[in-house]
Each structure stands twice: as C-alpha cells, then as structure tokens.
Image (cartoon, helix red, strand yellow):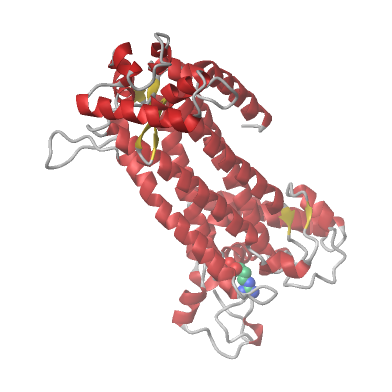
Amino acid sequence: MASKPDNPSNNALWGGRFTESTDAFVQAFTASVSFDQRLFQEDIEGSRAHARMLCRVGVLTKTEQALILKGLDEIEAEITAGTFTWSVEREDVHMNIEARLTEKIGEAGKKLHTGRSRNDQIATDIRLHLRSETTAILAEISRLLHGLLTLAEPHTGTIMPGFTHLQTAQPVTFGHHVLAWFEMILRDAGRLIDCQRRLNMMPLGAAALAGTSYPIDRHFTAELLGFDAPTENSLDAVSDRDFAIEFCAAAALCMTHFTRIAEELVLWTSAQFDFIELPDRFCTGSSIMPQKKNPDVPELVRGKVGRVNGHLISLLTLMKSQPLAYNKDNQEDKEPLFDTINTLRDSVRAFADMMPAIKPKTDNMRNAAQQGFSTATDLADYLVRKGLPFRDAHEVVGQAVRLGVDTQRDLSEMSLTELQQFSPIIDGDVFDVLTLEGSVAARNHFGGTAPDQVKQAIQRARQRLTEAGL
Ligand code: ARG
C-alpha cells in the first residue's frame, strides 16, 4: 500500500507514528488476513450497522453514509466474485476492507472507523460468525436427531443384547439403544443453544478498550445486528473469548458422543458382531484385501475428536493469564475456532446422512441376545416375586447358569425338572420370563426398554424436538 510522504511506514492505516517500515517477516508473522478473511461477511455487516449508527447520531452525513454503504456493497460483491485482492500489507480482514473502501469512495471511507477500533470490530465479527455457524450446525443436528428417530421407529420391538463391560447383560430393543444416542445428541444441541444465548451480546462501541468520546447509540447498532443487547463492560467486551471456548467445549462433548456411537457402529459392522449393514456409499474398500468394506465414515468421525479436543485446550491456554483488555494473543483464537466449526459441522452432516440409512440385521441381533444368558436377571426377579430374597435368587440363578455353560444351553432351553433342582419354587410359568420378548416387555416403565415404552418415548422425542425448535 502506498504511504504518504510524511509516513515512512509501509502501513497507511496505523503507520503515522512509525519511523521505519515493518520488517517483512514481522509483517507476515503478525498478519491474520490469510485466515480472518473468512469473516468478511460479518465484517461488512458490522461496518454497515456502525455507519448507520454514526449517521443517526450525526457523526456522518447522509451522503457519507450512502457512499459507505454503496462501497461496502461493491466490496462484498468483489469478494464473493473472487476479484478482491487480499493483501498481507493490509494485515487483516478489517484493514483490507477499509483500505479498499477508501480507494473506492475517498474521504468518506476514512471516516468509517470513527468511534471504533479493530478490537471491538473483531470481537463483534467472531460473535456474528459463531452465531450463524452455530445456527447452521444446529440445523444439521436437527436432521441427525430426526434421522435417529427414523432409524429407531421400526425397531421398537427388535431385540438385541444390551451390554455392560461389553459383555452381554440383558436384552434391550434396538429402538431403545438408538434413543440413548438421541438423548446424548439432544443434550449437545441444548448446550449449543445455550452458548448462543451468552454469545449474543454486542461489543461495538467498546472501541479499543474504554469506549469512545463520540455520542454513539450502542442499542441501535445492537438492534441492527440482531444482538440481544450491547455488552455491559467495554474492557470485558474486547478481551474475553469465553464464548469461543464454550463453543469448543460443547463441540468437544458432542464429538465425544459421536466417538461412542462411531465405536458401536464400527463394532457392529464387524464380521464378529454383524449387527448392521452400512450402505456402500459410507464405506470404502481396501487396495489389497478384496473382501474388505471399511466403515470409514464412523472411523474418521471417531478420529476427528482429537483435533477438536486439541482446539479446546489451545483456546483455554490462549486465554489463560491474559491481563485486561485486548492482547494480540487473541488473534490466535481464529484457526482453532474455525477448524472446530468445520469439523463439527462435517461430522454432524456425515452422521445425519448415514443414520437413517443404517440397516439393522435383526436376526443376528436376536441370536446374539439369545446367547450369554441375557435373561438371567429375569429368572432372579421371578424367584423374588415367588418369595425368595434377591441374594438367594442370585445364587440359584448362578448355579443354573453354570449348568448352561457346561452343557452349552440357554436357560430357556432347560427342562422344568432341570431348573427345579436349583429351586423347588420354580413353576411352568417360568418360561414366560425366560424368553427375550418377556424380558424386554417386563421393563415396562418410563424410560424402560419395553416396546410400548419405546414407542411412547419416540412420540415424546418428536414433541421435545418441536419444543426445542429442532
Ligand atoms: N487481527 C486482530 C485479531 O484477530 C484484530 C484486532 C487487532 N487489534 C490490534 N490493535 N492489533 O485479534
């Protein structure tokens, strides 16, 4: 950028007090334009609102306002069309746009920065950006949540083994299992919605740190930009990035939930489990083993938690010990935040596309539940209902299981006489509770795995999505 004769610096926007040009490496080292140009839309949005406010309070004339708005429209079009030239000399998105504005409209362009600093500008831009990105992510999460209900709905009575310690524990329904995922992700959505509430405060007017001596109307600007209110304290407004950290924490938790789901999908597609079929479009093959069909999408999502967790730690560490108010450290918030946004959005999208396409192999699930004595607890509960204390019932069933292990049979495959040798109070009605269907149907209370309960839970889930605006 051309410097004025009395400005020996290579920066026309802040070089006035400098006696030499910035070192070329330092210029590149301190520049952020390579990554913060992602914020151009929000930067222009913020400038439009700022100019309107300045005009309303009499700092800019109507003509100046009109020129600025027209210039900003043109710049927006240039950037969108890819004809805008970003320059490292102009350091960041703010100065690139402002310098271009002055090139286009002259003196009026130089007035846009009145009563404003890049410190409150960037604090505003990131908030606006995160607000809209979060809204987009929530739309994808909504698609995922509806997809999970689609997956669960036909399987309210489909029996599979439920696990603890990854050992067969008790039969559950596949619909119930999928609804557990639904609950995890719905809480993640709630966390993101909650982040947006605290995020939606407007820093503009905080200026560099202390506010500005111009008669600004921050409430007006806040309204124009759709913020709930202007921030209360100018020092806090330009310096804290807690909203970005909060988003990354919510993202890390959501990704962690995804890894749990991904892990199950990977296990279930293995030949050893063989519980589900993932459509080919979500898998890839092996270059050497012709038989392979790898569950790449869940595996990749599982792997991507690494970078998201890393970004959370980056931002926490970036913020740690920073004195008030703005420090250049904060320029380092963008790349971790942007990558977190991209990773979370893509992962949600991949899951949202994949979930309704999963094909459960219901016979295999049922057969697996038939093994591993998954109805042992039901036999114990049966004995308790007949008057035996639970500890004694536990012992009796343990002996029956041992016979099953020795003779390779399920409890339901033993004869009444065989079962009665462990306890004489066992009757012919015992076989009702030893079936898988009897076992799940018995867990017939709010939150339980009985098919009737799962059906009702799906209905409630739809209602809850509506109430949450999802
Ligand atoms: N590029 C800076 C950032 O991302 C913008 C604010 C810079 N302010 C300053 N006085 N250097 O944080």
Q: Quadrant of the N terminus?
A: bottom right
Q: Is residue 43 visible?
A: no
Q: Nearer the viewer, residue 257 or 434?
A: 434
Q: As drawn, which residue projects farthest toward the top?
A: 428
Query: In the rendered view, does 108 fall on the left or right side of 171?
Result: right
What's the residue at 30%, 41% (across, down)? Answer: 296
Relative to 43, say whether 209 is above or below. Answer: below
Relative to 195, say whether 36 is above or below. Answer: below
**Percent position of residue 362, x then y:** 33, 19
Q: Quadrant of the C terminus?
A: top right
Image region (quadrant) for ligand 1: bottom right
What's the residue at 81%, 70% (across, down)? Answer: 212
Q: Is residue 138 visible?
A: yes
Query: In the rendered view, does 348 fall on the left or right side of 100?
Result: left
**Percent position of residue 111, x then y:** 74, 67
**Percent position of residue 378, x then y:** 44, 23
